[in-house]
Image (cartoon, grey):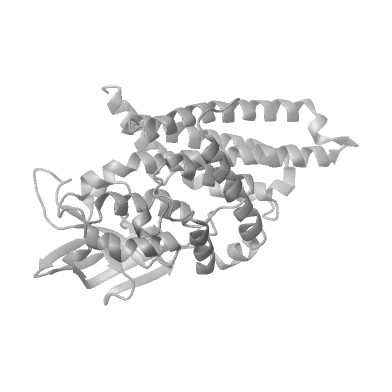
Amino acid sequence: MRRTLFTEDHEAFRGLARDFIEKEVVPAYPQWEKAGRMPRAAFGKLGETGILGMAIPEAYGGGGQDDYRYNVVLQEEAARALVTLSTVRTQLEVILPYFLHYANEEQRGRWFPGLADGSLLTAIAMTEPGTGSDLAGMRTTAVRDGEDFILNGAKTFITGGMQADLVIVVARTATDPDNRRRGLTLLVVEDGMAGFERGRELDKMGCKVQDTAELSFTDVRVPAANVLGEVDEAFGYLGHNLAQERLTVAVGSVAQARSAIAAAIEYTKSRTAFGTPVASFQNTKFELAACSTEVEAGQAMLDAAVAEHVEGRLSGADAARTKLFCTEMQARVVDRCLQLFGGYGYMMEYPIARLYTDARVTRIYAGTSEVMKVMIAKDLGL
């Protein structure tokens, strides 16, 4: 279906992104998969293109273009090439907004140039062992000590945690028995701070090109100058960016489902069974026709949500609806496409197998499908 979401500028950026991915990512991707991460040099190259600094103000070496649709284009082009860009998506779409919205002028001068040129990599540490989606139940603490905070606690499932130079840590700085949500603060922990340790690099089912870590903090002395925003007000900050975080997952889900269909079409045209191309069987045609229809429905819903987000009107409930539909749709489509590969679909040498394993986490992170349903039900007055 015809899309009206993008302008000529977005399409020009699409060409830049496609060229970079084809030249710099696709040839190196097998090595990145084996290493479990994208090398730091690749982040530097992304910085040189201006991609990493698109949303950062020009005064700090960025492009000054805070239009989420550029992020959408970048994700679509990576999916089209059957690759992922490691932790770039997390840095641009999940973490950078916290710096953009809450960093003061001194912090901007300290961190923004490195964020723009790719020399500073980031992570955000919210999830704790045993708490999952319950951010209000956070047990990591930060106690004021003069001009510093003393940070203690542990975090898990931290995307990019092994390579990050700056980690935004959500910690409890106060306790209000009448309001569990109050008293959380964002602290930026820097690589090399005493007491900050990177634990296990977690072995995941999918998403092999991005590292996922356990982090621990033992009496880490974090300067008050590294507080993002106001002390005790972080719960509201987290909620402010969750709509974009969930939308980001939905963008990847639709783009990767579309790539699964393209891969299945190519395979079934070249593969024969009983002397006939698999693509000529009625079952193959019906399956791919149904998958294509699901993707187009998801795309229409997603594009409407992106347009709302760009205009600053996307509600948390509508972001939840979009994530719920698009990720569940991705699971159905990728599974049906893999089936058309037969036994070869189970072999990791075929991209469809990676699309399948990568897809499973989209119904879990940024809020599980069950959490999305709770939010939608509340919006219905239930």
Question: Where residue 2 sits in the image (x, y, percent)?
Answer: 59, 25
Q: Residue furthest top?
A: 381
Of residues 279 and 322, the one nearer the viewer is 322
Of residues 273 and 17, the one nearer the viewer is 17
Residue visible at 32% across and 54% down?
Answer: 127
From the image, which quarter does the N terminus lie in? Answer: top right
Residue visible at 60% across and 55% down?
Answer: 20
Q: Is residue 108 visible to the viewer in this orientation of the structure?
A: yes
Q: Residue furthest front?
A: 59
Q: With 81 as the anchor, is 162 left or right in this view?
A: left
Question: Where residue 211 sits in the image (x, y, percent)?
Answer: 47, 62
Q: With 57 as the anchor, is 323 left or right in this view?
A: right
Question: Where residue 244 sits in the image (x, y, percent)?
Answer: 38, 41
Q: With 27 as the anchor, is 193 left or right in this view?
A: left
Question: Where residue 90 sits in the image (x, y, percent)?
Answer: 43, 53
Q: Is residue 210 visible to the viewer in this orientation of the structure?
A: no
Task: Please say if 349 is above or below 245.
Answer: below
Q: With 345 as the anchor, is 144 left or right in this view?
A: left
Residue visible at 69% across and 53% down?
Answer: 347
Task: Please say if 123 is above or below 192.
Answer: above
From the image, which quarter does the C terminus lie in? Answer: top left
